[in-house]
Amino acid sequence: MGDVVTMDDLTNDEIISILDCAERLVPVAKGEAHLPLLEGKVLANMFFENSTRTRMSFETAMKRLGGSVLNFSSVGTSVAKGETLYDTMKMIEGYSDVAAIRHPRQGAAQYSADAVEIPILNAGDGAGNHPTQTMLDLFTIRQAHGSLEGLNVVLVGDLRYGRTVHSLSHALVRFGARLTLVSPSTLQMPKEIVSDLISEGADVTETGSLKDQIAEADVIYMTRIQKERFPDEDEYAKVAGIYKLESSDLGGAKKGMVIMHPLPRVDEIAPSVDTTDHSRYFQQAFNGVPTRMALLCRSLGVDVPKKVK
Amino acid sequence: MSEMRRVTAIRNGTVVDHIPSGHAMQVIRILRINTSRATPVSLVMNVPSDKLGRKDVLKIEDRELNQEDLDRLALIAPAASIAIIRNHAVAEKMRVELADDLVNISKCSFSNCITKNAREPMPQRLRVVSHEPLEVRCYYCGRGQDIGELIENII
């Protein structure tokens, strides 16, 4: 109950309702309205792997709603002494009302959700899923285009290890978007995911070239080639820097096309793009706050009022 | 000579028929039959079969397979037929059926799955997402599993 481990834990109606709640919560996320919906509640931020945006936006989301946050890091704690994930989660269950978990091992969020009674929000498990990122991505796309249906979304870069794009592609297909997958052959989307997408009725194109896709795109979703997921440096060197967007590449783009990136970026998007009308990645990073607010409310069974003053 | 008579009939125990040809040794492993114990086990491999072309047959004396055994067996021999023998007569016939949820039968083979830490106490769980063709994924990490590896990783 209340767990969000993969996007499959949410129906399309629930997704829309969470996005609607997130929209109403924007003034609270900005600190312009005061709405202590989660006063007295405690969020455990269980980060077994580094994170900047996800961890901080969860914390801001909880605090803006009047709740408090326990920050856990695996460095220098019982985990370093060899504690199992099971034991760590059983302990934290006694200290908090909801937990966000990021873990280097795939399946850690589902494992935690099965181990404890408190709701678990998956904040990234290995190369697996990252559904709260997907929710804020959907929020950002809907904000730009008004709806999700029929859009041509171009996903670029590390589609093999990039958990963000795994969750996102499933969700986009559920809302009728077309997907164009751009990656080098060594970093293609895992075949079981592509086969799932196709069996869900998706219109999927796989290609290695980004420049050909710009003119037709409604959304270009760039990702970083993640050095830390490569077994050796040589393999990384072969593909590092393969896709780069400069403002000069965008001349033929549709007017409303938006460029997104889960951040951090390395050199996939040149700073010259930041000032164009297409850039949305900093807006996207902010959108993590209202979206995670809405997800926290859902997990804790708290209704967001229809009108937020 | 009837193919079933290549080895003597058993008095009490289980006959596992219609094992895919060449897989009887794996069945012995998956059923955790301790081959160094005194209980007689008869093995017939690669005999002609109307249903499978060729098949293996296994006769295990003094052991009646239970539902958990059958669930495990289904991973290797989904078409197997089982006869429980009591006092030389077939007392019960059973078919194997692969469940949708395989708990503590085999281990996920993905090196970065959370279940790879042997000290984690939660059960190993695999999901059968398709029976024909057989497609199995880890319940926790979602990775597609190689059936050969699953058989190697039998618990």
Image (cartoon, rainbow, N blue to C red):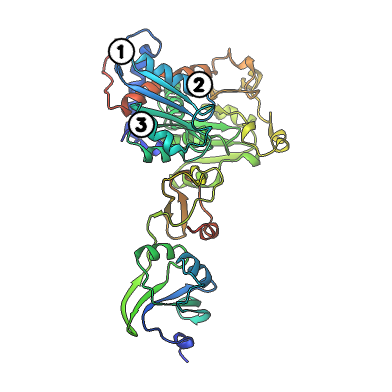
Q: CA distance from mark 1 to mark 3?
A: 26 Å
Q: CA distance from mark 2 to mark 1?
A: 23 Å
Counting other residues with Cα less than 10 Å from the Cα at mark 3, is it few (<14), some (14-19), or many (20 or more)? Answer: some
Q: Give the percent coordinates (x, y) of residue A5.
A: 41, 36
Residue A174 appearing in the image: no
Q: Give the percent coordinates (x, y) of residue A111.
A: 42, 41
Q: Give the percent coordinates (x, y) of residue A122.
A: 43, 32
Q: Give the percent coordinates (x, y) of residue A19.
A: 36, 25
Name the kind of residue labelled 1 in the image: Leu
Please report whichever mark, 2 or 3, sits nearer to the chain's N-terminal start.
Answer: 2
Q: Is residue A84 above or below residue A269?
A: below
- Residue with the mark numbered 1: A35
In this picture, residue A10 sits left or right of residue A269: left
Q: How many marks?
A: 3
- Residue with the mark numbered 2: A53
Element class at badge 2: helix
Q: Nearer the viewer, mark 1 or mark 3?
A: 3
Q: Is residue A170 above or below residue A292?
A: below
Q: Are marks 2 and 3 on the same chain?
A: yes
Element class at badge 3: helix
- Residue with the mark numbered 3: A93
Please report whichever mark, 1 or 3, sits nearer to the chain's N-terminal start.
Answer: 1
Element class at badge 1: loop
* Residue at mark 1: chain: A
